Amino acid sequence: MKKIIYFLLIVLVISACGNSKASEKEKTNKTEQKSEDELSTNIIINSNDTMKFDKKILLVPAGKKITLTLNHTGKFPKVGMGHNFVLLKADTNVSEFAEKAAMARKTDYIPEGDQTIAYTKLLGGGESDTIIFEAPKKGYYTFLCTFPGHWQLMRGKLIVK
């Protein structure tokens, strides 16, 4: 009788382990599928008067045309609380770029050079801007707001898959 009970316990343990492996594979497949489904070519980002973007991570497919809309949902004018979306090239030193940007008032805080991939115009409360650009090669890219003092709070990553 004890042998039968031990045998049944072993069978239960083995079958439970087998099911967990199958469910782990199913979870992995669902996770991979979910991340592919989250890749977007149409992105909407909102910014506000508390110096925040509502998204910190953007997932896009490599080489595809991306349409990005930035909304400034706050009420303050761009003179005091302007926001933009600036996508930097992968090898750009973010803090150096932000320092140059803070001095580029005449060009709405976009410094001269070739360190950007795309950017919106500078917006005040209630304004929006839409840009279209081609997603770069696979990798990680920083985006930020270049209005003076904003870049440390208003930045994120564009992940190209």
Image: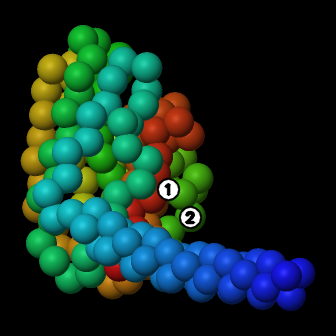
- The answer to whether residue 65 is left or right of residue 57 is left
Q: Is residue 8 above or below residue 140?
A: below
Q: Is residue 94 visible?
A: yes
Please, which colouring scheme is shown?
Answer: rainbow
**Residue 10 coordinates in the image, percent (x, y):** 76, 84
Could you tell me how far apart the alpha carbons at marks 2 and 1 are, in whole angstroms?
Answer: 6 Å
Q: Nearer the viewer, residue 8 or 53?
A: 8
Name the residue carrying label 2: 93
Seen in the picture, residue 51 relative to 17 is either above or below; the reply is above
- Residue 116 visible from this viewpoint: no
- Which quadrant holds residue 88? bottom left
Q: At x 42% / y 54%, what residue is drawn?
A: 57
37 relative to 148, above or below: below
The quarter of the picture where the N terminus appears is: bottom right
Q: Residue 83's image quarter?
A: top left
Q: Could you say where residue 47 lies in the image, as x and y percent from the top left?
A: 31, 31
Q: Judge left or right: residue 92 versus residue 69.
A: right
Q: Nearer the viewer, residue 83 or 42?
A: 42
Q: Tell me whether circle 2 and circle 1 mark residues in contact (CB < 8 Å).
A: yes
2 relative position to 23: left or right:
right
Number of callouts: 2
Say what secondary structure mark 2 lies in: loop
Image quadrant where residue 113 sits: bottom left
Q: Residue furthest right?
A: 2
Give the farthest residue toward the top: 75
Q: Residue furthest front?
A: 1
Q: Which residue is mark 1?
A: 97
Please rate how many residues cluster around mark 2, counting C-alpha atoms within 10 Å: few if below 14, some from 14 to 19, many from 20.
few
Mark 1 belongs to which amino acid? Phe
* Front residue of 24 and 152: 24
